Image (spheres, rainbow, N blue to C red):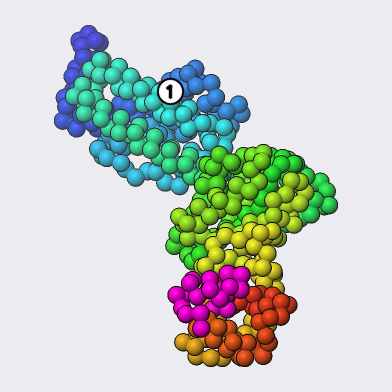
Amino acid sequence: MPRHNNRDNVRRLTMRIMSRQRPSAVLIDRVRQRSDEIVMKVLTRLRADITDYLPSSGDSVESVRTNIADYLAELLDWIDLGADPAHWNLETANRVRQRAGEGLTLSNLLHAYRLGAAAIWDELARLADTDEIDKDALIAATPSIFAWMNTNSLRAHAVFREIDLRDARRNEQIRAALLDTVLFNESSIGAPFWDAVAALGLPRTGQFTILAATRVEPSVDHSPPDIETLISAHPAVQDTWFRLTSHAQLGVVSLRRNRADALDGIANDICADIPVTIGLSSPFTDIANCSKARAQAQVAASACSAGRLTIRYDRDVMSVLLASSPDAAASVVTATLGPVLELPIERRAPILTTVDTWLQRGQSVSATAEELHCHRNTINYRLRRFAELTGRPLTDNFWLAQVALALEAARDLHNT
């Protein structure tokens, strides 16, 4: 019998055996038999089409070859099972992280997936043309190939997003450390201060203010409002550099020329819209004064209250003075208003309100009566009663200054 007849008989017998198998199993078996060849074709195609895909070292090239073989094996499992075989484990994610660390971009990785899937599909199509596999099996496998490619793309996106978030956190930590150097150190420390200024891109001179913002009610359940974005959007603001903590924000604000006082209005608008209080330093022009201005902003922030959401260090002098020494402020309240504070609240409140209003209205009884909707005699009675309780006349200007200070301190203590 001619030798070619024997070969034909073997081929027919093989085809009959194969016909009894699942078409997808035949396809997978054929591809696995040619896996080394397919991997080399994919590797060659990637080398030609993506310049930066292959690392320069031989060990890394071998690692890429192994990765392609692993991806091919996973694809075959997809075709076999018709679904995600859950092979995306820590090792697979680490391979993507490793390639990212070698400089491979997400766009090139996704392009590699497309080229790899196309090369594998071309090889399957070639096998189908030679009748080595059932064409129906190839048609049935095609959706799995594209689903595999899509899923790998989503996985790669997730890993690169994780890397971006990690890098962002690292960059934010570096930025925060640089800001701490500028905000909490004198320029006299020399190189570390000026290196941080340069790294942050802070101008050495300009129209600066330090801002300290604090949530009215600190909460771990809500992230702090983005004060920096709100301030940066204002046309009077040139640039901002902010340090963010869990419930407070501290930052340098650079204002445009001749707009040094614009931040007052911006801060008031922000506090009217979101639950924060804002302390502002005095405006300054030399970045070397950052540390001094930061201390001012934090004192001003500590002077803020529910009744006074924004405080500027060089404007709200009395509040700042009291906030600078809380113990002294409490002592002034006790020494000045003590006998009045001992009264029941229904008798105490009208007297203190009357004295406070009288001082704010230029010591005018008529204006005070109009403001409080009371008769002049009622106002005069309350003023006399205050003088009797404190033992000091309201004609003593030095005493009146202390009374005004004590009323301000009492108001801040009550609103804090």
Residue 244: give x, y in percent of width and height.
58, 54
Residue 387 appears in which quarter of the rendering?
A: bottom right
Quadrant of the rendering where the C terminus is positioned: bottom right
Closest to the observer, 128 or 206: 206
Residue 233: give x, y in percent of width and height.
52, 42
Instruction: Identify the residue at horizontal 61%, vertical 70% (top origin).
Output: 362
Residue 363: give x, y in percent of width and height.
61, 73
Quick one: which residue is furthest to the top in this view?
2
Magenta: main secondary structure = helix
Looking at the image, can residue 125 be seen? Answer: yes
Residue 384 appears in which quarter of the rendering?
A: bottom right
Determine whether, in the image, residue 254 is placed left or right of residue 352: right
374 magenta-colored:
yes
Quadrant of the rendering where the N terminus is positioned: top left
Closest to the observer, 263 or 226: 263
Looking at the image, can residue 327 be seen? Answer: no
Instruction: Identify the residue at horizontal 66%, vertical 41% (top origin).
Output: 258
Instruction: Identify the residue at horizontal 45%, vertical 59% (top origin).
Output: 222
85 magenta-colored:
no
Residue 128: give x, y in percent of width and height.
25, 19
Q: Is residue 227 above or below residue 12?
A: below
Determine whether, in the image, residue 220 is placed left or right of residue 59: left
Determine whether, in the image, residue 284 is placed left or right of residue 390: right
Determine whether, in the image, residue 136 is placed left or right of residue 65: left
Q: Give the range drawn in magenta.
A: 354-377
Which amino acid type is shown beneath numbered disc 1? Answer: Val
Q: Mark 1 points at which residue?
A: 42
Q: Number of numbered discs present?
A: 1
